[in-house]
Image: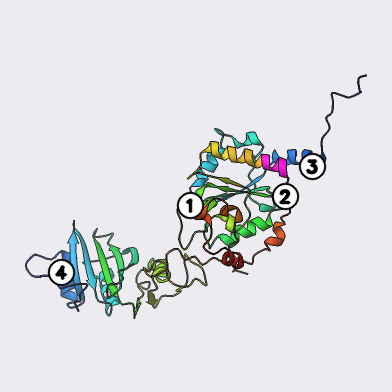
Amino acid sequence: MADAAHPPEPRGEAKLPALTALLEQKFSGQVLAHHAQHGDETVVIARARMLDVFRFLRDDPACRMEFMIDLTAVDYLPRRPRFELVVHLKSLSLGHRLRVKVPVAEEQAEVDSITPLWVAAEWYERECWEMYGIAFKGHPDLRHLLLYDGFRGHPLRKDYEKGLAQPLVPLRPVRERWNYGERFMPVNPEQEDQAS
Amino acid sequence: MKLPFAESFITSKLDDVINWSRKFSLFQYPFVTACCGMEFMAVYGAHYDGARFGSEIPRFSPRQSDVLFVVGTVNHKLAPVLKRVYEQMAEPKWVVAFGACASSGGFYQNYTAVPGIDRIIPVDVYIAGCPPRPEAVLEGIIQLQKKIQERGPRGFDGINPTAEHPVPRLSRE
């Protein structure tokens, strides 16, 4: 399952941190990569069985991740797989944390929703969907959260045109500003006049 | 020969008198969206006391207000609301763009921020600063009063904002 983005790491020599070791043992082959820094563990898991892994992390007495801290994504254009879903989990009763990453390909930008496991993930997934265009299978109400109906594209993708606004109210030309100098002149004054 | 009542009245034009009373009774509608609001509160707090300029009472109904203070960033999702609030205000009305974001979008030159509220509604006074000092705001109010005294309400100089801006429909309706 390892690919160019996640080369297999040398294993067996150093002792694995507790949660990583547990996942390795329970879901062998599903853990694509892992690392730990200052006691915070990170695992990269495969998309196919991610829901099983998350359910295990929530329900297993050794994990007990009651708290979904954060869910977001990263666009690694031009890397393939392009996206990575990032979920932060915390166990309030056991006092440990885990960062779970799931590589997501651009061609198949759909992952399982974890809202059935943590209700708190609902709005995070809505935001993640509108900003990165990653759909969440099984989400109860996948619609815009911060943006508005009719917004085309996904603004936090790296290939979204920088500064491309999609106004709801047509913008009127402000001729007074054109007197301030070239910087304030529209590129094409006639076009701006027509647009408003 | 001394005229009767010579010292007890002055002569003026009716417009001047009306504009004089308008400029000292500005009821403001605070459309506060961002951090500039803190400076706005400072201006109308006891220390800087915007009431000295007759611009004392905030009205949270656009129907009852004379001047719209747009304080802070306005994004494209909020733009229909701002436009509707402006349309709901009764004539005569004025608009103040408070701070860098309201005036030009500030440093938000991206997919979400309106590049200056004058792209949505007409603006009378721009107050620079990020956020502006209370002194700058008071200067802005004085500039607005000067404008009201000299020019009267908008529409008297040939611009009819109601025809230019029909009431926008909100998506809920």
Residue B83 in picture, x, y percent from top left = 62, 59
**Residue ID for mark 2:** B92
Q: Which chain carries label 3?
A: B
Residue type at tag 4:
Ala
Q: Which chain carries label 4?
A: A
Mark nearest the camera among 4 and 2 is: 2
Asked whether residue A66 is drawn in magenta, I would say no
**Residue ID for mark 4:** A21
Same chain for marks 2 and 3? Answer: yes
- The residue at 59%/34% (across/down) is B49
Q: Alpha carbon of mark 4 to alpha carbon of mark 1: how far? A: 50 Å
User: Is residue B47 toward the left or the right of residue B90 in the image?
Assistant: left
Residue B10 vs residue A15, the one in the foreground:
B10
Question: Looking at the figure, which quarter contains the C terminus of chain A?
Answer: bottom right
Q: Alpha carbon of mark 2 to alpha carbon of mark 3: how far? A: 13 Å
Asked whether residue B153 is drawn in magenta, I would say yes
Q: Is mark 3 on a helix, strand or loop?
A: helix
Answer whether residue B44 is visible to the viewer in this image: no
Residue B167 vs residue B136, the one in the foreground:
B136
Question: Looking at the figure, which quarter contains the N terminus of chain A?
Answer: bottom left
Mark nearest the camera among 3 and 4 is: 3
Residue A190 in picture, x, y percent from top left = 59, 65
* Labels 2 and 3 touching (C-beta < 8 A): no
Q: What element carries label 1?
A: loop
**Residue ID for mark 1:** B106
Q: Alpha carbon of mark 1 to alpha carbon of mark 2: how far? A: 29 Å
Residue type at tag 3:
Asp
Mark nearest the camera among 2 and 3 is: 3
Residue A71 in picture, x, y percent from top left = 34, 66
